[in-house]
Amino acid sequence: MTYLAKPKLLSADAPRNALGYTRRDYEGAISTLCAGCGHDSISAAIVQACFDLDIEPHKVAKLSGIGCSSKTPDYFLGNSHGFNSVHGRMPSVLTGAALANRNLIYLGVSGDGDSASIGIGQFAHAMRRGVNMTYIVENNGVYGLTKGQFSATADKGSKSKKGVLNSDSPIDLAALALQLGATYVARSFSGDKEQLVPLIKGALCHNGPALIDVLSPCVTFNNHSGSTRSYDYVRQHNEAVNRVEVILPRDPIEASYPPGSLRRIVQHDGSILHLRKLDIDYDPSDRIGAINHLQERQALGEIVTGLLYVDSSAQDMHSHLNTVEKPLNQLGDAYLCPGSKALHALNDALM
Amino acid sequence: MTSAQSIASINDFVIKFANVNGSGSASANELFARAVMRMGVPVAPRNIFPSNIQGLPTWYEVRVSEAGWLGARGGCDMMIAMNPQTWDRDVASLDAGGYLFYDSTKPLPASKFRDDITVLGVPLTAICNREYTDPRQRQLFKNVMYVGALIALLDMEFAVAEALIVDRYRGKDPLIQANIHALRLGYDYVREHLPHPIGLTIRRADAVGERIFIDGNSACGLGAVYGGATVAGWYPITPSTSVIESFTSYCRKYRTDPDSGHARYAAVQAEDELASIGMVIGAAWNGARAFTATSGPGISLMQEFFGLAYFAEIPAVIFDVQRGSPSTGMPTKTQQSDLLACAYASHGDTRHVLLFPENPYECFTFGALAFDLADRLQTPVFVLSDLDMGMNESLCKPFDWDDSRRYDRGKLMTYEELEAGKDFGRYLDVDGDGIPYRTIPGTHPTKGAYFTRGTTRNAYAKYSESGADYVYNMERLRRKFDTAKNLVPAPVLHAASQPTRFGAIHFGSTSPAMAEASALLEADGIHVDTLRVCGFPFCDEIMQFIAEHEQVFVVEQNESGQLRSLLINEGEIDPKKLVRVLHYDGSPITARFISGRIADALSERKISPIRKVAS
């Protein structure tokens, strides 16, 4: 992500990852979002996460629906194929793409309108179906492109820029994802890159549906007093349960932590999640505990962030479907067409 | 009660079985139909069923036709009246001189019968109660027993039905014995107690030939397997569900990796039709051949996605098994009423490629072809079947496949081409046919990636709100649609025995009724050339056919004349030239209906000038 066209030439000492790529190689077109938009910070965090993980950009497919958030995949990973689909339907398009080729990394980017209103059905079913994806909701509580209507995640009692009180109950996508069977659930804040980048990295390494609900203030329509999605409000109410660090199998180990303060989780691909506990009693492998914690703290007005839940032994949709290892889109004619001999035998049976 | 004018016919009549839904009659009725076929006489069976699982009336109609007419005929020569609920209307629906077969265990008053029909009573319940103790067996074997009775009444060969039972239950000897016993009970009762054969008889013939017997939905599913489909996103809806069931069942058989036992396909039951078509579009965008199967209400729900696929140029195959409409309409009745909804599906200026199979053979061939066309044209392709074709087994030519055929994956730009520096503009018309090149995600590390959008972009897939870019794109899409004209299957002409000024255009499952109607009309000295349209966009041959005839009847199974509207719109045809012949009550169109309407229309034409002279 970038606002301004940058010179093509890179300084010789620009950091390079194991693939020899610089961060620039993970950027996309120039953002057209408002200056200060939280979404641009999320795009930058995605760039950083992919750079850190040495992901080949063309092995990522980025899909979105419609809205400000859904425009962003154009602004990062310019060498990845992207699909700006229809409003609220990114999950099904991504599911289909994932069915076609199990070997790509799928990144779904959506917003609160796209996922919690028009697309809540598809959101729910992608989670319960076990689609192997990173699902990032850029959650600002408001419809930006149509100029400031409340979305379904806006808190009851919060005030719009025009002074209207929201009377509807909010949908908590992280809580919903926990209930629906997502196997990696996190919440973060676009203004906290230190927290967000490792959470995205952990999600990209996860095998199964990974949801990150990122509170991402809308500077134009939802950053005023009375809003519960403004930069100030989120900073003041943010209560992180942990801090994550993602350790790749190749990385040297390891920092020392006071006993009991660190939890180590090995994911399916060998990556290791180091969870530094901020809330000593919080157990991110306890799904029901996580749901309860969210409810209790939200009732107190806190915004709970961090890695809320992870099931490191999760299996994805392809293992449920028992599909072949080789991506379906790469199977040649001979693997697909039963041929004339089989057809003749079938004809005989149909006479 | 035998009437003097009983219908007499060999190998040419209609028998209807009136049953209760869920009573297990379907397999017995099918046994009868297959027994007739095994004697070399073609049959055209049809289920007439409610939108219900158990308890409501259901009918199975078997048209026996040595001449090979497979369309519905209308009328009924013999009724197997097994459903007390529908007794009165079943009896009333018999043609005069017809035969009524019933369970005579309980006596019925004379008022329940007609005096112009032959009544044949067999005490099925009494025999069953004597022979079986298990209630379920009493029900099931009652069905087999009436088939045994029919074998005797119609002078069929007992051994043929016996052999069918042996085939069906191969390896399950107790079942074979029990079924043959029941068959024998019915057969023997008739031989001992009733005059037989009746006026309707089956005589061994050789008119079935090599043909196979299968329903259109199974054939569509098989077509998808042969067409190389690997991803199916779907949502259950009558009458299309069995397309997917067929696909997955053939895939289990043909697409299970012999070494690993893994599946070389993925079929996902989606949460709704929006998600099913979304999955198809995502999979196709990612280079897999993908399809869905649905019916009218699903087509309505998928509209937004069709527009996206059209504009983003993504191959997708949709099997639409049409049913009675609008809205939820008549879910278990047939119609051809989704034509316009599919041809111009979605908002804005869209138009789609449609294929119209006539029978299961074409469900298979067009089904497989649809995947090549979708990849070649990078657009959704609709295969429009209907309930009559989809859910009824029908005789058709055996399937064939050319092993030298390779899937046409269309214009895919490869790693090598990108590496060699070939210019890649996702929406650039390089070859003048309107079809651009595409890349599959993951093709090349640094070249060929693009951002797919349903909104305006330039030829290089960059976001653009420029009017000129938009117009370039729309003109290219129009060229692409013109290219499709000659890729869809050509229409099938059937010329009348004499040159004629009159033509008839039809499509899909109307085909067998139309062919028979032509023969009926010919017999009355009325000559009509017929043209079966097999695809949309319409090729020039279709417009030429219209131009060459003074009057053209457009025969279709919907209320508004959708094919006619499409012809008028696309070919700029004078509406007066195209005469509607419309059948839309939910039952399949018949030859009697078509020939009657055409004959009436032509006689009106001849009479009107005389009237003018007289006044």
Image (cartoon, coloured by chain):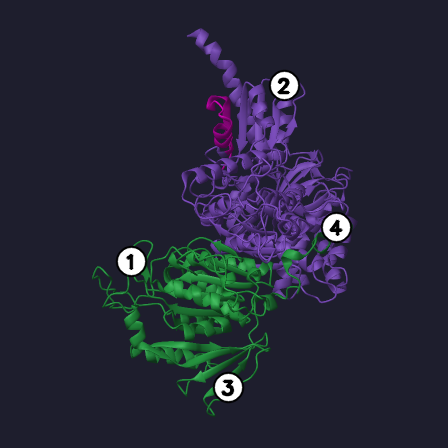
Can you name the residue that lies furthest to the front here? A12
Q: Indicate which disc, 3 or 1, sits on the residue closer to the N terminus.
A: 1
Looking at the picture, which amino acid does disc 2 mark? Gly
Please, what secondary structure does the residue beneath circle 2 have? loop
- Between circles 3 and 2, the one closer to the viewer is 3
Q: Which of the pair A275/B184 is nearer the observer?
A: A275
Q: Quadrant of the C terminus of chain B?
A: top left
Whether residue A80 is visible, yes or no, is yes
* Residue assigned mark 1: A149
Q: Position of residue B366 (x, y in %)?
A: 64, 42
Dot in front, 3 or 1: 3
**Label 3 belongs to which residue?**
A255
Q: Position of residue A51 (x, y in %)?
A: 52, 68
Q: Amino acid at mark 3?
A: Ala
Is residue B553 found inside the magenta-colored segment of the image? Answer: no
Q: What is the x, y in percent for residue B592?
A: 58, 30
Asked whether B565 falls inside the magenta stretch, the response is yes
Output the letter for the chain in green: A
Chain that bears disc 4: A
Residue identified by numbered label 4? A339
Q: What's the CA distance linking mark 1 and mark 2?
A: 71 Å
| Chain B shade in the render | purple
- As shown in the figure, which amino acid type bears the numbered disc 1? Gln
Q: Nearer the viewer, mark 4 or mark 1?
A: 1
* Residue B54 seen in the figure: no
